[in-house]
Structures are given as structure tokens and as C-alpha cells.
Image: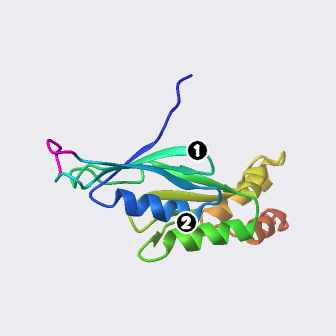
Amino acid sequence: MPDIVPCLWFDTQAEEAAKFYVSVFPNSRVTSVQYYGENGMRPAGTVLTASFELDGKPFIALNGGPEFTFDEAVSMQVMCADQDEVDHYWSALTADGGDEGQCGWLKDRYGFSWQIVPTRFIELLKDPDPERARRAMEAMLTMRKLVIADLEAAVDRPQEMTR
């Protein structure tokens, strides 16, 4: 299978965004920056693309202009091992103009959508007891940032009596 590399379209912030993302995720780096030439669609010498890796996975940030913007139809899921990771990525990605969404979703300062998901939530959704899994989903739907302890408490609460 060929390599698949996500390309994120920015107006003019490609290099800035690449540097920001590599500062948030460990084992990450900007690998190259390419510039528009004399016959480019933007002034010669301005950044065309910034290639970067997030924990070894390649991405490209493109300065394509204001014609296209991000929306929630595309997002990156960050699978977190524990609450400390959830808190770290949530805080870092919403800093300086990011926007908290519902159900573990957020937009960073560039308007790009991320899902910050504890792996424990996925485990709770796969509980063999469908009622416990349902309670996990219901609890998640009430949250912005996902809180593992609150998800577990919702799953473990006694089933309400029906009258």
C-alpha cells in the first residue's frame, strides 16, 4: 500500500501550525519547508508547505490561501492512555484561541478539529453488558473534555428502578 499523508490546507499559517503541532506531541519534528518560486500562486519566498511528523507519522501543511477552511467533517483522533494525557492534549490544543466542543471534540487555534479520546472510553463502550455501554455513551454525550473517572462512575452506577 502506498504511503498516505494527510495534507492540511491553511491560508498562510502552514509553518506556524506545523511548529505548534510538533510542540504539542512528543517525538515530533518539522522535516522540511518548501517555498513558492517565482511563478507560484503566492509571492516568491513565502512558505508553500511545511512537512512534519507527529510521533513518526507524516503530515503536510500547505499554504493554499483562504479559499478553503477546516470544518468538523475531518478531524484527528488522539487516543489517550490516561487522564493526564487527555488533560495535556485538551489544554495544549485549545490554548490561545482554540474552542472546546462537545463529546471530546475541540478546534485548535487554526480551526482544525481534534477528538481527544481516552482508550478507557472505548473499553467501556465494548462492555459485554449493553446497559453499561449505554451509560458510558450517555455520560460522554454530556461532557466537553472526557473525564475517565466520570465515565466510569456513570457505568458503575446502579441501574435505576423502573416504576
Q: Residue at position x 77%, y 57% from top?
A: 120
Judged from the image, the secondary structure of the residue bearing numbered disc 2 is helix
What's the residue at 53%, 30% (across, down)? Answer: 3
Q: Residue furthest bottom?
A: 96
Q: Quadrant of the C terminus?
A: bottom right
Asked where in the image residue 128 lies, by quadrant, the reply is top right
Q: Is residue 99 left or right of residue 126?
A: left
The kind of residue tagged 1 is Lys
Local secondary structure at mark 1: strand
The picture places residue 28, in percent across and down from the top left corner, at 59, 55
Residues in magenta, as a range? 37-42
Tell me if mark 2 has few (under 14), some (14-19) or many (20+) residues whose alpha carbon lies within 10 angstroms of its own. some
Tell whether position 147 is magenta. Answer: no
Label the magenta part by its dominant secondary structure.
Answer: loop
Residue that label 1 marks: 57
Q: Whole-percent x and y of residue 67?
A: 21, 51
Amino acid on which the number 2 mark rests in the picture: Ser
> What is the C-alpha distance between the residues marked 1 and 2?
15 Å
Along the line of sight, the residue nearer the viewer: 110 or 104:
110
Residue extending farthest top: 1
Horizontal side of 9 relative to 2 (left or right) equals left
Q: Is residue 118 visible?
A: yes
Query: Residue 26 versus residue 91: which sits nearer the camera?
Result: 26
> Label for residue 23?
2
First reached walking from the N terminus: tag 1 or tag 2: 2
Q: Write the residue at 64% across / 56% down.
A: 27
The picture places residue 159, in percent across and down from the top left corner, at 82, 63
